[in-house]
Amino acid sequence: MADELDLLRNANPVPTDGPHYGDGPLDGRAEQHLARLMRGGTPRRGRGRMWALAAAVVVALVSALMLSGRTTAPAVAAPRPLVVRADTTPVILDTLAARAQARADGSPALRKGTHVQSWSLGMSDDEPPVTLPEERLVRWHADDSHTEVVVATDPRHPGRPVLTGEGEVVDDGHVLSRRTYPPSWSDAPPQSPPPRDPGRLRAYLSEAAYSRTDLSTGELLDAVAVLLDTWTLGDRESAALARLLADAGDLRPVGEVTDRLGRRGLAYVHDRNGTREMLIMDPATGAVLGLETTFTRAQPEYGVKAGDVMAYRAWMR
């Protein structure tokens, strides 16, 4: 982060002794520094207005920190992709599913509600991408009402201010929203309890995804995220899900990783539409720990490079 801040300080597009202004062309030095920070490539002439917009985002962040008296930089840096440990042996999903089934004894039990930490990349046509970290806790009550609390926090940088989707810089742990919803008696997926049989679970996930056809592997992963955003699975439901994912046959084992919450997991990857999805699963229980999506192709119109993390979700008990 310090290196990035140094680049930004040196890339001041409006020096006090210079003729340029925020909506005019930058000088060559400013363009080079901003290009290094934003693109990692060579700047093109005639793009001064775009660089000025990027600088304005930084100026807004710095101003917010100065006005609030903060001296710590906000946690805005995008997370790096998870790295597979080179000294580990991949475990095929079929083996993991069998392991999960063998140890499933009903503990822990299925629970409605979720606890998830997420990082998502905010992109636009005229501003650089920024990473927005949030923690969401959903708890259901005896009368079928539920409460959702969303907090701005990044566990990679405890105590550091956090950038929100509205462009605000807030304290770590700041409550973004707290809502209580009235009772819901829907019996349609994903509100109804997920089955413990892999075949029935596939039909359940198809209905949760509003699909009338068999789900592709990518669509199946999307549906799994919907499920885990609603339910905290017990060991028997996790075993059924592990078997279903193994039967999909299109998730490649790549080895062991440590996720962004410090948990050890087995990683399985799937490529689709210019992205790579990495599913992280508990090596003992087969429970899904997280899902990471990274770009495999650059999208220069959004300031995105191949390998950038588009989204990451970590589910907890």
Image (tube, rainbow, N blue to C red):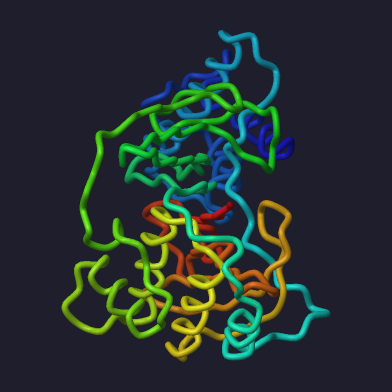
Q: Position of 5 compared to 45: left or right?
A: right
Q: Residue at x 35, y 38 (%)?
A: 146
Q: Residue at x 68, y 43 (%)?
A: 156
**Quarter-wise, where is residue 188 in the image?**
bottom left
Quarter of the image containing the N terminus? top right
**Quarter-wise, where is residue 108 in the image?**
bottom right
Q: Compare residues 222 and 272 and report the one nearer the observer.
A: 222
Q: Position of 52 compared to 117: left or right?
A: left
Q: Residue at x 63, y 89 (%)?
A: 95
In this view, 179 is above or below 137: above
In this view, 198 is above or below 225: below
Number of disc labels? 0
Q: Looking at the picture, how far across and down is residue 229, in whole percent?
A: 41, 54
Q: Residue at x 53, y 24 (%)?
A: 174
In this view, 201 is above or below 25: below
Q: Looking at the picture, how far across and down is residue 176, in whole percent?
A: 44, 27
Q: Looking at the picture, how far across and down is residue 51, in whole percent?
A: 45, 37
Q: Compare residues 131 and 14 and report the one nearer the observer.
A: 131
Q: Looking at the picture, how far across and down is residue 263, in whole percent?
A: 71, 59
Q: Position of 296 compared to 230: left or right?
A: right
In this view, 227 is above or below 270: above
Q: Compare residues 126 and 291 and report the one nearer the observer.
A: 291
